[in-house]
């Protein structure tokens, strides 16, 4: 068949439409999986340790859920930029991401295009007409599956007429004989489409339609593994030096892996044919067209086995690879060690459900800074430690950075497609951050009150000093109990105790205020001392109120 006898416009529209359906399905499925497993993803992050094997497992699981190795790599670059991961640790997660992303290929290799429309119908009903979140997310996943298979079927049908064109097939025959060029084509296509899964779908569609043989498909798939690393390197351009090194590491071990696999290409293909059921060259006549139903599974298995083998080879050598990346990307001048105050970055928004969990951790870190300011205020008021007073004011500037950056991040995060529970958590984090900021501000107010007392030579009586010491210690204990509450499994029971403690502090404040008024009447304390004392009592009671508000948010199970 000549090219002029083929409706090129229709083929282009079908290909674009099929690709659009495929990418939309990927997005729907990814969002549904993230929303339905949001808490699990947050817990998985806690497994990130210096253990390379665990890091690889985390990368594989997270990528299998979010259905994008590029998103996982970009997220890891954000972690490294924020100082949450070492380079070796990040590289282990990226290795796992390479394995996790092969799940998509395994899914689309199933020849169940007949189920595409039923999946879309069922998924749409669950997604649109039900209100229960778990059912809505399930509907989103099923709808995504249906769109993926419909997109694959549309792309395969688009390519079928081209299988009769000798001119078109000659281009891909060239790839069969020149695997290096096929690798470059695969890398370029993935860079343009910005999705290795989509390029994998196109490759399987081409092979199923009989336009390319297994040799060309193998080389294209290997190229896709290089192309997907370019996204992370682009994301890291304006990131920290360590983030650039992580992105470079991803590129290097995929590039090196593809290089040695090209050398052993034919033995590797024979191995895949051996472990995969069905003859790769088996064909079936469908009307006037011929399709190859087995080749998709061979391509998917090749993709999976390449990344598993590459991971097993590189895993023991990750520290060496990390050192190589550090030597390649280094500053001419000695870099000053600068740690970001807030461990959040825009790259983390690519995985919103995970980003929610990370923001929770940053809110707890912010709370610890607020407690440090309170501790400085305690030393200033009780021990007249002016060095601690200056330190508290300095830390308050850091607290302001936390307040601004967390709230800015939450604003961006709330605009993402996330579960209803995660939206509630975001609201509670925002409220908690405001309460924490007030604890810091009020602690600074304690310091300022003490400074005024020193300037005016105001001294409390021994009774007033003792009462002030008592209530400060009570408030301090109350504040520290919040951290314990956060990790406690019996939050609803403990919140009742918190309510009692908060009420106790309020009653003590009222009692001490009355006692001080009696001392004023008796002439034991001066009026300026009385005003300062009451001001300190009121500020401490408000700090306890802020702490109790945070405890309530934690007990709500949505913080």
Image (cartoon, helix red, strand yellow):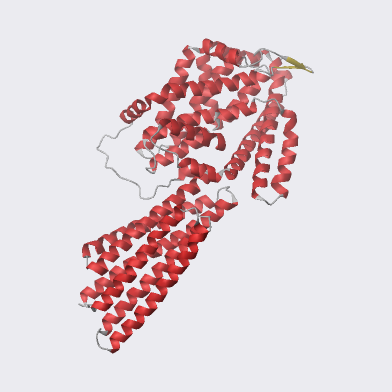
Q: Is residue 99 above or below residue 3?
A: below
Q: Is residue 157 left or right of residue 534?
A: right
Q: Residue at x 32, y 85 (%)?
A: 517
> Of 255 and 364, which appears nearest the observer?
364
Q: Is residue 491 left or right of residue 133?
A: left
Q: Position of residue 231 (x, y in %)?
A: 48, 33
Residue 73 in sight here: yes
Q: Is residue 107 above or below residue 77?
A: above
Q: Residue at x 31, y 58 (%)?
A: 395
User: Which image quarter: residue 217?
Assistant: top right
Identify the residue at the far right of this view.
287
> Of 283 and 511, which appears nearest the observer?
511
Q: Position of residue 46 (x, y in %)?
A: 45, 42
User: Which image quarter: residue 323?
Assistant: top left
Q: Is residue 327 above or below residue 269?
A: below
> Of 98 and 486, which appears nearest the observer?
486
Q: Position of residue 87 (x, y in %)?
A: 37, 34
Residue 238 in sight here: no
């Amino acid at each position: 068949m000549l090219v002029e006898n083929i409706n090129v416009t229709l083929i282009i529209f079908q290909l674009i439409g099929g690709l659009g359906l495929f990418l939309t399905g990927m997005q729907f499925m990814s969002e549904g999986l993230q929303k339905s497993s949001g808490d699990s993803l947050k817990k998985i992050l806690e497994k990130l340790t210096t253990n390379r094997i665990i890091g690889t497992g985390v990368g594989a699981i997270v990528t299998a859920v979010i259905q994008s190795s590029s998103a996982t790599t970009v997220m890891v670059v954000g972690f490294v930029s924020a100082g949450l991961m070492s380079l070796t640790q990040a590289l282990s997660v990226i290795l796992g991401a390479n394995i996790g992303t092969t799940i998509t290929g395994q899914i689309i290799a199933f020849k169940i295009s007949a189920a595409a429309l039923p999946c879309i119908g069922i998924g749409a009903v669950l997604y649109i007409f039900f209100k229960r979140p778990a059912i809505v997310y399930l509907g989103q996943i099923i709808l995504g599956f249906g769109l993926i298979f419909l997109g694959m079927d549309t792309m395969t049908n688009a390519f079928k007429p081209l299988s009769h064109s000798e001119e078109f097939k000659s281009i891909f025959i060239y790839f069969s004989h020149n695997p290096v060029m096929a690798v470059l084509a695969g890398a370029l296509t993935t860079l343009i489409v910005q999705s290795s899964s989509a390029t994998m779908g196109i490759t399987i569609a081409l092979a199923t339609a009989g336009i390319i043989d297994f040799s060309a498909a193998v080389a294209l798939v290997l190229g896709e593994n290089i192309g997907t690393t370019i996204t992370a390197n682009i994301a890291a351009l304006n990131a920290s030096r360590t983030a650039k090194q992580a992105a470079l590491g991803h590129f290097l071990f995929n590039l090196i892996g593809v290089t040695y696999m090209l050398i052993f290409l034919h033995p590797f293909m024979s191995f895949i044919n051996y472990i995969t059921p069905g003859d790769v060259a088996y064909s079936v006549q469908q009307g006037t067209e011929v399709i190859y139903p087995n080749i998709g599974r061979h391509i998917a298995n090749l993709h999976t086995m390449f990344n598993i083998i590459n991971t097993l080879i590189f895993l023991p050598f990750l520290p060496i690879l990390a050192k190589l990346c550090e030597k390649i990307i280094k500053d001419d001048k000695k870099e000053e060690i600068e740690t970001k105050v807030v461990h959040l970055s825009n790259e983390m928004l690519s995985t919103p459900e995970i980003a929610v969990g990370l923001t929770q951790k940053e809110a707890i870190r912010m709370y610890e800074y607020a407690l440090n300011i309170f501790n400085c205020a305690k030393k200033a008021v009780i021990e007249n430690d002016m060095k601690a007073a200056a330190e508290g004011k300095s830390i308050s500037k850091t607290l302001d950075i936390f307040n601004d950056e967390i709230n800015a991040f939450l604003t961006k995060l709330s605009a993402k497609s996330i579960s209803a529970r995660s939206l509630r958590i975001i609201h509670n984090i925002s409220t908690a951050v405001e309460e924490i900021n007030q604890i810091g501000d009020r602690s600074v107010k304690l310091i300022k009150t003490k400074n005024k007392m020193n300037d005016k030579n105001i001294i409390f009586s021994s009774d007033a000093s003792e009462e002030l010491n008592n209530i400060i210690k009570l408030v301090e204990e109350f504040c520290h109990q919040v951290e314990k509450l956060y990790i406690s499994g019996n939050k609803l029971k403990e919140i009742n105790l918190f309510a009692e403690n908060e009420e106790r502090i309020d009653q003590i404040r009222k009692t001490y205020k009355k006692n001080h008024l009696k001392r004023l009447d008796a002439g034991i304390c001066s009026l300026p001392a009385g005003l300062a004392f009451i001001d300190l009592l009121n500020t401490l009671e408000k700090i306890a109120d802020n702490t109790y508000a945070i405890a309530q948010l934690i007990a709500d199970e949505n913080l």
